[in-house]
Amino acid sequence: MGRDTPNAIARAEATARDRGVRLRPLNDSNPTRHGLGPSELPGVYEADPRGSLAARRELARFLTDSGRGGEGVVDPDHLYLLDSTSEAYAWLFMLLCDPGDAVLAPVPGYPLVDSLARLVGVGVLDYRLRYDGSWTVDMADIRRILESPEGGRIRALVLINPDNPTGSYVHPEERAAVIDLCRRHGLALIADEVFFGYPLEPLRGRRRLAGEEAVLTFALDGLSKSLAAPHAKVGWIRVSGPEDQVAEALRLLDRIADDFLPVSACVAEDLPRLLAAVEGRTGAVLDRIGDNLRRLEAILASRPRCPVSLMRPEGGWSVVLRIPSVIDEDSLVLRLISQKAMTDQPGYFFDMPGSGYLVLSLLPEPTDFVEGATAVLDLVDAMLEGR
C-alpha cells in the first residue's frame, strides 16, 4: 500500500471535480453515452469500480437491517460488488501483496485460498487449527510463523469464520489475539464469512469480523452461500479499519476494480429481489443441515462400538468424520465408488493433520444422506475386519 501515486493529469482532474467542474472527456468510448446502446439493455453504463451505487445502497441497507453486515452501520461507499468471493480474494491479494509476498491461511481448510494466491504470484503460509473436542486457532503457531525468517513476507492473515470444512467459528479470545497480532505486525485481516449464517449450535460471543475497526479488515460474503445458489455469482467486500488505512485501501482497490470492471448491471439491478429471498433460503438450508446432523448423531449412537466419530461442528454445510487411521482414505473412497456407487473427498484434500478423516456434506435429501453415511460406516467396519 502507498504505491500508485496519481499523475499530474489525474490530480488536475480531481481538483477540477472538487471545484464542481464537469469535465467532458474527448476520449469517451462508452457507446451507451452516445445513443448506441442496445434497447434490450436500456440506460447509460456507469463505470463505478465498486459496482452500481444503487445496488450498493440496497445491499448496505440489507446488511445493516439483517445484522449480516457485522459491526456498525454498513457504508455503501465501503462496499465492493464483484462476481464472487473468489474474485475478491484475488483482488485483495493483488492489493496487499507484491510477487513473492505471502499471506497466512488456516489448515485444515478448503484449498481455494492457496490456489488463488498462487495464480497471482502470492505465497501462502499455513497456520494450524487444532482439535481437542472443538477446533481452535493455534495462536502459538501463528506467532512462530510471524517471528520466523518468513514472517517479513507476510502482508495479511486470512480468517475463515466459520472454517470449511471443520465448521469452527472464530471465538472471542481468538479474535482478540489475532487482531492484536495483526496490529503489532502491520497485517491486514481478510475475513471470509460466507458460511457465517449457518450455525449448527448456539455459541456465546459468536460474531462477524465485518466492520472491525481496530485493524484494516476486508470481510467477504456473497449470495452463493446465503441464497444457497452457487450460480448466483454475486460477492462483496466490506472494508473497515483505521480511517487513514481504509482511505488508502479504497483508493488502490478502486484501481484494481476499475481494471477488472464492476459487476454486471443486469445482476446489480436484480440484487434487491435476490436479497429479499435470502432469509427464506437460509432458513431452509438451516433446517436441512440441522436435521441431517441429528440423523448422523443418531446413526453413530445406534452403533455403540462404532470406530467412527464425529468431530464437533459449530457451523457450515459439512462435517468431518474421524475414521481409524489404519484405514487408507483413498482405499475407502475407491471402495465407495466400486461397491456403493458413491464418492467422497478424503481428509488430506483439506490438509487434515494426518490420515483418518472423511468429509460429508449435510445438504443432501434426508434419505440420501442416511444412505451415504450408513454406507461409509459399513465400509469402515468391513475394512477393519479385512473384508
Image (cartoon, helix red, strand yellow):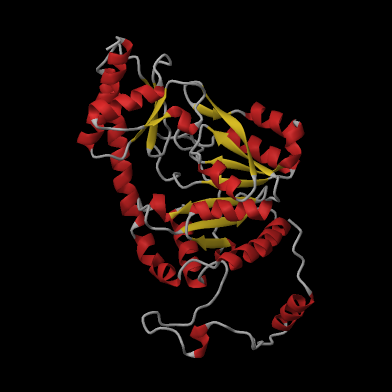
Q: Is residue 216 above or below residue 331?
A: below
Which image quadrant: the N terminus? bottom right
Quadrant containing the C terminus in the rendered view = top left
Residue 47 percent across, percent down from the top left: 55, 74
Q: Which residue appears farthest toward the right when viewing the image?
A: 8
x, y percentage for residue 98? 71, 51
Q: Is residue 209 visible?
A: no
Q: Is residue 134 above or below residue 259?
A: above
Instruction: Determine which quarter of the picture holds residue 286.
Output: top left
Q: In the rendering, at what x and y percent does residue 195 appear? A: 44, 44
Q: Is residue 254 left or right of residue 373?
A: right
In the foreground, 163 or 354: 354
Residue depicted at x 42% and y 31% = 313
Q: 200 left or right of 19?
A: left
The one of 232 and 122 positioned closer to us in this rendering: 122
Q: Is residue 335 visible?
A: yes
Residue lying at 68% horizontally and 52% vertically, measured from the top left:
96
Percent coordinates x, y for residue 10 in the rendering: 73, 76
Q: Image quarter for residue 344?
A: top left
Question: Residue sitting at 53 percent across and 41 percent down?
Answer: 160
How many numbered circles does the render carry?
0
Q: Quadrant of residue 240?
A: bottom right
The residue positioned 47% from the left and 63% from the top of the image is 59
